[in-house]
Image (cartoon, rainbow, N blue to C red):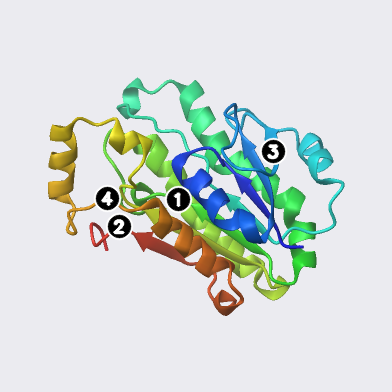
Amino acid sequence: MTRHIIVGSTGDIGSAIHAGLRDAAEIWSFSRSRTPDHDGIHHFLDLSQPLDAVAVENIFKGIDHADSLIWCPGETLFCMLQDTPLEKVDAQYNISIRSLITFINVLLPKLKKSGCGRIIIITSIWGRHGASYESVYAAMKGAQETLIKSLAKELADTGITVNGVAPGVVHGKMTSELSQADQAFLLQELPQSRFVAQEEVVHAVKYLLAPEAQSVTGEILNINGGWYT
């Protein structure tokens, strides 16, 4: 049975990925507090705090293999750097890097048993190009990209591929909460004059999961409609 591990499964993108994969696989999902919209084996974890690796190992001790780790969690932090409390910097680091590395280390033996294991990290356009007032968030997403490129080389001979997906402005709860005027202003900045559909991100993930993408590793797929290239 195909088995996908989706971390951050209750946000817009994570939930869409869960929905897109659930019919053809067993899904193990993780969130901080929200219950997922879709069926599967679910656990609650606060990724903003340092994880106990043994506790994470115990969650997966009953399975022999995993076919993918799909990492979706993110927490926006809109603040000037000099006004950012170090506690929030630590939380961003834990969500984007430390917890991710903990999961990778725990799941690596199980991904190797898959024969075509996948690690897919949902990063951000700001990890590629930087963002004022979001320096910490962008820095952590940039660190994810460096991890992707490095780990892809490290794991190349195992059959495990490591890739990222960097969406632009995705239509969802956050864009829906904007006023009509703010949405119109933002759309003027986008070359295609449209937000990225969640399904487009799901399609990219499905491509990276496919056997036909076995030679694709260490890459970041940009999905932003030409906003940044």
Q: x%, y% of residue 221?
A: 42, 64
Q: CA distance from mark 3 to mark 1?
A: 23 Å
Give the mark nearest the N terminus, 2 or 4.
Answer: 4
Q: Nearer the viewer, mark 2 or mark 1?
A: 2
How dense is the environment of label 1, judged by Cα within 10 Å: few (below 14), some, or many (20 and up)? many
Give the mark nearest the N terminus, 3 or 1.
Answer: 3
The residue singled out by tag 4 in the image is 195
Q: CA distance from mark 1 to mark 4?
A: 17 Å
Q: Nearer the viewer, mark 2 or mark 4?
A: 4
Give the mark nearest the N terminus, 1 or 4.
Answer: 1
The residue singled out by tag 2 in the image is 224
Identify which residue, 102 or 191, lies in the foreground: 191
**Secondary structure beneath label 2:** loop
Identify which residue, 25 or 138, lies in the foreground: 25
The residue located at (40%, 35%) in the rendering is: 136
Q: CA distance from mark 2 to mark 1?
A: 12 Å
Q: x%, y% of residue 124?
A: 39, 49
**Marks 2 and 3: in contact by CB < 8 Å?**
no
Q: Is residue 97 left or right of residue 175?
A: right
Give the mark nearest the N terminus, 3 or 2.
Answer: 3
**Marks 1 and 3: in contact by CB < 8 Å?**
no
Amino acid type at image mark 2:
Asn
Q: Nearer the viewer, mark 3 or mark 1?
A: 3
Identify whether 65 is placed above or below 9. Answer: below
How dense is the environment of label 2, judged by Cα within 10 Å: few (below 14), some, or many (20 and up)? many
The residue singled out by tag 1 in the image is 123
The residue singled out by tag 3 in the image is 42
How dense is the environment of label 4, judged by Cα within 10 Å: few (below 14), some, or many (20 and up)? some
Name the quarter where the N terminus is drawn. Answer: bottom right
Amino acid type at image mark 3:
His
